[in-house]
Amino acid sequence: MTALSTAPSHAPAGPVRFGGAVAAPGARLAAQAGLAALTLSAAHLIAPTFGHALPVAAVGAVGTGALAVMLAPRLAVEIASAFGLLALALGDPTPTYAGYHVTLVGLLFLCRRRGWTLALALALGAVVVPKTLFWLCSGRPDVHGWLNEPALAVTIFATIYWWRETRDGRAPALEAGRSPLAAWCLLYLFPSQIAVPLVLGPGDLWRARRDDAGAVLRALASFVAKAAALVTLRALFPNHGFSCHSGAALASLPRPALWGVVALSYVDLMLTLSGTIDIAVAVARLYGWQLPAPFRWALLAWNPVELWRRWGIYNRRFLLKNVYFPLGGGARHRLLNVMLTFLASALVMHSGWLGSKYWAVGAGGWRDWSIYFALQGAAVCACLITWRLVGKDSAADRELRWSWGRLAGTLATQAMSALLHVIILPQAIPLGDRWRLIARCLGLR
């Protein structure tokens, strides 16, 4: 494993542009203050709609950091890391964790030059010690309640990401004179983590910044629009979710009504996930990191392959770089590698904190998510096999366009995905009854 490199690549952020005009320094600062206040106030007010809470103190820390970056752009990495740590401490119900987190990040930095030492430190600090606390003292939250599982997950994924990209020579070089420790901390303490943990790597954060008020406003408009759509959906269909019905009640619904619950729950999930991550993207853009939107009209995807190209691009990119391509992502073992990548997604992305808190599979853990992702992977493989038989290039025809065939494909793809979400969304219903609901939707019962 190599150390962080120090060749130049970072450039100071350019001026903020409004309507093509370059703002004067005083006007820039005032504009940034107004933009930060508008974006973060909206995020604070809207986050509960998506099931999250952004404490005022933490939001204030993030906003202050955005202004500090504007004043000292050459220290953007250091400032973002410092205010990311402050936001973590202020936003966590048990701020004790912030001390543990920064200690673990520092330990990993010291071990970064030796691969096995780094792996051991990561395994002990992010998995073994905290999970054992949960396991041995599951009934004593005073012993383990201070731990922050999402932040620990970010620590695991960021370290893997850094190791893979650095080993393969894909990690961007750092500006001469830039502190490797500051760049390292940015991977673990990025301010957007206050909204939702994103799987970001060096390629996302070790690059030139660019202040763009328009990009921030587009992210703001996106999560506001999704929140409005979510509020409207819940007002029009107040009992649309699985949580509003018992298993027996769902089983007794007429088939069209059952499909309505399935479809609306799926749309609710899509709006919630994408809206939450749009808040994180807006925060990143406030600091000058122009992260792309992670959901790209996934509800309009017209086949299973395109669905996963458009759904959660940060998780997808992490899995491609760290699972699919290392397996040898060529044509020879393509289908097997696709399935293994989807199963890896069940393990590292959607099973809580690498499975469960208590060293057990548990309800809603590996079992349900593994079934879900195995079926989604099978759908992708079926699509790839069909394309191979008809001679279609899997990289072709990826732009949104209208046709009756596209409409039919979109409806079939989204119905399939919505139906598979029955496996994971109604956790209060036994798994066997969930399968019976799926069968009923398909007219098999």
Image (cartoon, grey):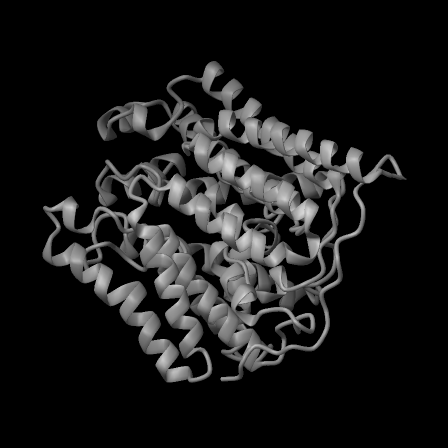
Q: Please determine whether, in this image, residue 70 is positioned above or below residue 199.
A: above
What is the x, y in percent for residue 78? 57, 58
Q: Residue furthest top?
A: 236
In this view, the residue farthest toward the right is: 21
Residue at (80%, 51%) from the top-left corner?
Answer: 14
Measured as percent of width and height from the top left, residue 285 is found at 65, 45
What residue is at 68 percent from the left and 51 percent from the top? 72
Q: Is residue 395 left or right of residue 142?
A: right
* Image coordinates for residue 297, horizontal then vertical, percent: 64, 41
Residue appearing at x 68%, y 63% in the figure:
207
**In the rendered view of the protein, which quadrant contains the C terminus?**
top left
Q: Nearer the viewer, residue 262 or 41?
A: 41
Closest to the observer: 228 or 380? 228
Residue 313, image quadrant:
bottom right
Depth order, front residue of 18/123? 18
The answer to whether residue 263 is seen in the rendering is no
What residue is at 75 percent from the left and 53 percent from the top? 13
How many dots with numbers?
0
Q: Is residue 278 above or below residue 235?
A: below
* Viewer can see residue 220: yes
Quarter-of-image position of residue 206: bottom right
Left or right: 291 as drawn, with respect to 135:
right
The answer to whether 177 is drawn above or below residue 16 in the figure is: below
x and y, in percent, of residue 289 in the image: 66, 52
